Image (tube, grey):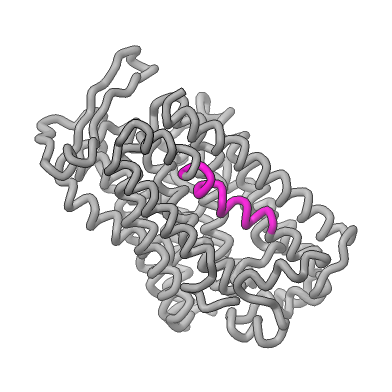
C-alpha cells in the first residue's frame, strides 16, 4: 500500500514506536541509536534519506549528551583523551556532512548499505580487551597528556591507563568523522574499537569516552544539516523522545536481559537494514 | 571542582533545558497549539522529497533564517535543536578559563580550537545558508 494512503499522523506515531524499541535494544546491545535508526527508518519509512540522516545525527547527539554527565562524574570518560581527537573528528564530520548532502542520494544510500553491512561484520567479529597489555606510550600521546587513572567500580580498584599509536588514532577518528557526518550514524561502533584495540585504552574508559567524543563530533555535523534546512521537527522530535524513553526502559532491563542474544538480534537487524539500503541504493528494491 | 565535574554540571543542565524546550515545542506544534508554516496534513508530500526540492517547493529557510519565523510551530522546535547544538560550546567555554589560569596552554589551545570549529559549523558559513 502506498505511504500516501495513510493519514500524516501515522508516520510520526510509528516513528515514535520504532525508536522506542530501538532505544531499548540499543542500550541492551551497547550501541548508539543512530546506527540502527538511519538504515531502518531510511529503508522502511517514506522520509527522504537527507532528513533521516539529519535526524539520526540529532538522535545520536541527544543520547550522547544525556549520558555524558554520569560518565564524566563517574570518571568513565576522559576529557584529556577525547578533546584532541574531537577537534579532528569534528572537522572531518563537517566535511562528511557537506559531502553527503552534495552526492546523489542513490550513491549515499548504496554506500550507507555497504557501511552498515561492514558494521554488522565488525560487531560480529570484533574482539575486546578489558585492560590492554603492552601499551608503550608514544611521544604524541604523552605530549597531549593522554594518560590518567580511573576508578573501576566493578573491581573496586583504580586503573592506570596510557595510550599508544596516537597518530594512527588521529587518522582513524578523522575517517570516523567523515562517516558520521555523511551517514548521520553516530560513531560509537567505531570509536570503541579504535580507543580499545588500536590505542590501548581500557574497555570501560573507551566506551565512556566514546560517548563524550560522539557528542562533539555529531554536534559539528548536525549544524551542517540544521543550516542546510535538512532537519524536520516532525521526524526529529518523535525520534528523540522515543529513543530517550526506550533507553530508560533498556537501562532498567540491562540486568536481566541476555546481552549476547540482544547483540545477535542487533546484528541481524543491521544485516537486514544494510541489505535494504544497499538494494534501494542500487535501484533493485524501491 | 575539577574540569570534568564542571563540564558534567553544565552538560547536564544544558541538555535537560534543550530537550525540555524541544519536547514542549513539539507537543505545541503537533497538537496544533501553534500555527505551522506547512500544514501537518501536507507533510507527506514534502518529507519524501530530496532536500533541494523540498526547500524550493516549501520556501523553508536555510541557515539562521528560521529565527525570523519563530511564530510558526516547526521553527519553534528548532530552538530546542539549536540549544542541543550549543550545549557543547557552552561546556567548552566554561572550562577554558580554568585551563588558562593553570597555564595549561596546550589544553587551552585545543579547547579554543574546538570552540572555533563548532562556531564555524553553527554559523552557517560552511553550509552556504543564510
Q: Front-most of A211 and B88?
A: B88
Residue A230, by quadrant, is bottom right
- Whether residue A53 can be seen here: no
Question: Where residue A226 appears, x then y in whole percent?
Answer: 58, 66
In the current view of this chain or complex, which residue is farthest to the top? A156
Residue situated in front as seen by the camera: A226 or A142: A142
Task: State which quadrant residue A44 falls in.
Answer: bottom right
Residue A34 to residue B93: above or below:
below
Assess whether residue B17 is covered by the magenta stretch.
no
Q: Is residue A140 left or right of residue A37?
A: left
**Residue A225 image point, x, y percent:** 54, 68
- Residue range corresponding to the magenta coloring: B79-92
Which quadrant would the C terminus of chain A be assigned to in this image? Answer: bottom right
How far across and down, in percent of the image, does residue A42 sit?
55, 67
Instruction: Name the side, left or right, on which A192 lies relative to A28.
Output: left
Eyeballing the image, is A159 above or below B60? above
| A3 up-or-down from A273: above or below | below
Residue at point 50% right, 47% down? B88
Position above or below: A130 against B124: above
Count of numbered badges drawn on the protein: 0
Q: Is residue B69 left or right of residue B64?
A: right
Prevalent SS, magenta region:
helix
Q: Quadrant of the N terminus of chain A?
A: bottom right
Tell me what residue is drawn at x 72 percent, y 83 percent: B59
Residue B6 seen by the camera: yes
Q: Nearer the viewer, residue A48 or B10?
A: B10
Residue A29 in the image: state x and y as whole percent: 45, 40
Is B91 magenta? The answer is yes
Residue at the (46%, 70%) spot, across then down: A277
Along the line of sight, the residue nearer the viewer: A158 or A280: A158
Identified at 58% across, 28% down, the residue is: A252
Amino acid at each position: 500500500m502506498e505511504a500516501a494512503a495513510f493519514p500524516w499522523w501515522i508516520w510520526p506515531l510509528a516513528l515514535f514506536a520504532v525508536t522506542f524499541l530501538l532505544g531499548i535494544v540499543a542500550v541492551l546491545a551497547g550501541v548508539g541509536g543512530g546506527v540502527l535508526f538511519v538504515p531502518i527508518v531510511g529503508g522502511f519509512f517514506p522520509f527522504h534519506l537527507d532528513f533521516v540522516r539529519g535526524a539520526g545525527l540529532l538522535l545520536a547527539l541527544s543520547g550522547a549528551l544525556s549520558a555524558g554527565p554520569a560518565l564524566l562524574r563517574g570518571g568513565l570518560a576522559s576529557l584529556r583523551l577525547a578533546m584532541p581527537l574531537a577537534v579532528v573528528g569534528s572537522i572531518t564530520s563537517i566535511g562528511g556532512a557537506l559531502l553527503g548532502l552534495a552526492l546523489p542520494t542513490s550513491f549515499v544510500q548504496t554506500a550507507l548499505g555497504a557501511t552498515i553491512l561492514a558494521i554488522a561484520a565488525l560487531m560480529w567479529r570484533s574482539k575486546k580487551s578489558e585492560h590492554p597489555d603492552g601499551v608503550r606510550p608514544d611521544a604524541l600521546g604523552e605530549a597531549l597528556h593522554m594518560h590518567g587513572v580511573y576508578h573501576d567500580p566493578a573491581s573496586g580498584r583504580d586503573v592506570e591507563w596510557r595510550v599508544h599509536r596516537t597518530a594512527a588514532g588521529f587518522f582513524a577518528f578523522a575517517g570516523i568523522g567523515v562517516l558520521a557526518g555523511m551517514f548521520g550514524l553516530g560513531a560509537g561502533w567505531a570509536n570503541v574499537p579504535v580507543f580499545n584495540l588500536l590505542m590501548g585504552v581500557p574497555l570501560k574508559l573507551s566506551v565512556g569516552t566514546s560517548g563524550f567524543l560522539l557528542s562533539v563530533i555529531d554536534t559539528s555535523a548536525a549544524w551542517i544539516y540544521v543550516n542546510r534546512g535538512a532537519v524536520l521537527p516532525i521526524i526529529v522530535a518523535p525520534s528523540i523522545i522515543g529513543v530517550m524513553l526506550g533507553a530508560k526502559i533498556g537501562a532498567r532491563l540491562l540486568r536481566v536481559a541476555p546481552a549476547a542474544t540482544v547483540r545477535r538480534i542487533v546484528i541481524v537487524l543491521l544485516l537486514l537494514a544494510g541489505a535494504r539500503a544497499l538494494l534501494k541504493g542500487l535501484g533493485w528494491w524501491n | 571542582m575539577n574540569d570534568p565535574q564542571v563540564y558534567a554540571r553544565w552538560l547536564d543542565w544544558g541538555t535537560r533545558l534543550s530537550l525540555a524546550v524541544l519536547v514542549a515545542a513539539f507537543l505545541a506544534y503537533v497538537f496544533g497549539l501553534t500555527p505551522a508554516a506547512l500544514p501537518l496534513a501536507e507533510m507527506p508530500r514534502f518529507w519524501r522529497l530530496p532536500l533541494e526540492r523540498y526547500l524550493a517547493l516549501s520556501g523553508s529557510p536555510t541557515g539562521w533564517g528560521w529565527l525570523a519565523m519563530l511564530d510558526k510551530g516547526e521553527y519553534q522546535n528548532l530552538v530546542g535543536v539549536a540549544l542541543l547544538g550549543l550545549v557543547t560550546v557552552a561546556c567548552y567555554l566554561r572550562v577554558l578559563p580554568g585551563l588558562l589560569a593553570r597555564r595549561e596552554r596546550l589544553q587551552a589551545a585545543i579547547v579554543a580550537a574546538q570552540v572555533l570549529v563548532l562556531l564555524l559549523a553553527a554559523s552557517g558559513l560552511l553550509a552556504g545558508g543564510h
